[in-house]
Amino acid sequence: MSTRREDGPGRKDGDRGPVPVGSAGSAGSAGSAEDAPSVGPVESVLDLLYAAPPSDFVSLRERHAGAARSAGRKEDARRLHAARRPTLAAWAANLLTRSLPEESRRFLELGRALREAYRALDADGLKELSAQRRSVVTALSRQAADLAREAGHPLSEGARREVESTLLAVLADPAAAEQWAGGRLTGSLTPPSEFPSGGGRAGPAPRERPTRPHVPPEGPAGDELAERRRRRRQEEQARAERAAERAAREAHDRRAEREDADAASRRAGDAVDRAREEVSAAERRLREAHAELARAERELGTAREREHTTAQALDRAEREA
């Protein structure tokens, strides 16, 4: 587990300045970035990308990477092109660190206090801090959902649960806290299973029972056998790591596609509602036009009848004259 220093939300000392993003302003920031691709420091461009809604991420990334490539900054272009698009839940969690820096700082401090109480086996401190943890995680996840909705990207129930999982991981794991504080999460985080859920007394980790090591046969045959086994273990581990990486990428891509489909479905539903309203308005205008036509036809009939009566009266008058 990482033991790097936790400096709070935003950025580490001397790294880069924070990119201000309002609760509903991230989409606007993304729009300005798309109008004029930046060739500024790559860290600032990455901040702009991760402040943008996930639906705009890929197009913005390619525009900025192309601008860096055109400027002759191949390494910056490579870094930008390698940036992974965040899921909707990860983007909402990132919104918290950007939009609520003071609340995020206090949340990180709560995590440090919880971990310290767990290490010190302070049951009373754990009980009190765990109660705070439950209320703070609930409040922050609700604020993340509010920020996402105000930015035009409401969270599903599943995405809200992923935000809560990320916040719990931030409290339990210093490495997760540092990732979240950077504001560039690409997926939700999972809290470690050994961190206490609160209320109970923390105890020492169970001691593992010693196992007897396997001693290979001595001599050249034993050395060759041990070497083959070592190579086989390395190959199996490499295959497992590659498979795990492929599975993680596949899961990330499928989650992103699902979120795109959900967003497209919501947009289509809104468009259908608007179309129905327009059809209703058009039908109402058509009924009014039909009523107006009938009224005009009646008036025309009355006028023609009056004209006919007048013509007859004039004809009689002329005959009498």
Image (cartoon, rainbow, N blue to C red):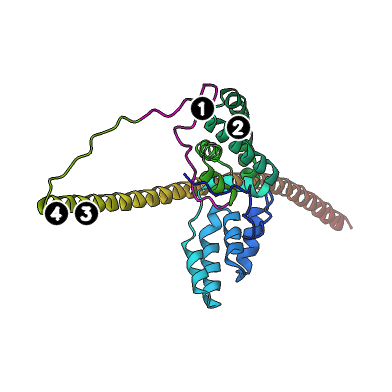
**Residue 220: image x %, image y %?**
11, 54
- Residue depicted at 62% across the width and 48% down the height: 95
**Label 1, on which residue?**
197
The furthest residue to the right: 321
**Label 3, on which residue?**
231
Q: Which mark is residue 224?
A: 4
- SS for callout 2: helix
Classify 10 Å Cα crowding around label 1: few (below 14), some (14-19), many (20 and above). some
Visible residue check, residue 278: no
Left or right: 120 with respect to 220?
A: right
Q: CA distance from mark 3 to mark 4?
A: 11 Å
Given this view, does label 3 or label 4 mark the residue nearer the observer? 4
Inspect the image, locate mark 1, and give the three-letter code of the amino acid beneath it.
Answer: Ser
**Label 2, on which residue?**
138
Of helix, strand and loop, which mostly describes the magenta segment?
loop
Q: CA distance from mark 2 to mark 4?
A: 58 Å
> Quick check: 205 above or below 91?
above
- Residue depicted at 51% across the width and 39% down the height: 162
> Quick check: 19 above or below 133?
below
Given this view, does label 4 or label 1 mark the residue nearer the observer? 4
Q: Which residues are magenta?
A: 183-207
- SS for callout 4: helix
Q: CA distance from mark 2 to mark 3?
A: 48 Å
Classify 10 Å Cα crowding around label 2: few (below 14), some (14-19), many (20 and above). some
Inspect the image, locate mark 2, and give the three-letter code of the amino acid beneath it.
Answer: Thr
